Image (cartoon, rainbow, N blue to C red):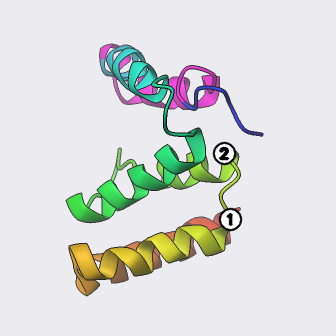
Amino acid sequence: MAYKNAVLDDKELQESLKSINPKFGDFVTRVAGEAWGLPLIDQKTKALITIAVDIANQDHTGPGNPFGAHVSMALKQGATRQEIEEVLLFMCAYAGFNKVAGCFGTLNEIWNSL
């Protein structure tokens, strides 16, 4: 189910953010919601970009990490597993093979839990 705004329209995501910390959840929802509301880049592309940022930041494991949420967000916006994997492969050239290897491991764990 694709949302018009992948942050502001996803109440489950907002509750998950608030569970980390209520003030943090509200802040992220407002700021990210505004960014996701910008009109020129579609929601699926934005979701794939967030995965690329997670790779570059090496932010895919541990409590509160956004990688799983961003994979879920991309899937909700119509991305396929193959598209997500292609983003990971593409990022090998720009973020490094070792960073991507860990993300493939995490992606496999996410996929196996679905």
> Does residue 84 appear to the left or right of 4 in the view shown?
left
Q: Which residue is mark 1?
A: 80
Residue 78 seen by the camera: yes
Q: Which residues are magenta?
A: 7-23
Quick one: label 1, few (<14), some, or many (20+) residues within 10 Å? Answer: few
Q: Quadrant of the N terminus?
A: top right
Q: Which residue is mark 2?
A: 77
Q: Nearer the viewer, residue 108 or 51?
A: 51
Q: How many marks?
A: 2
Q: Name which residue lies at 28% across and 58% down.
A: 59
Q: Name which residue lies at 46% across and 29% down.
A: 36
Q: Quadrant of the C terminus?
A: bottom right
Q: Is residue 58 magenta?
A: no
Q: Is residue 19 magenta?
A: yes
Q: Name which residue lies at 55% across and 67% down.
A: 84
Residue 80 position within the rendered picture, expressed as x and y whole percent measured from the top left: 68, 65
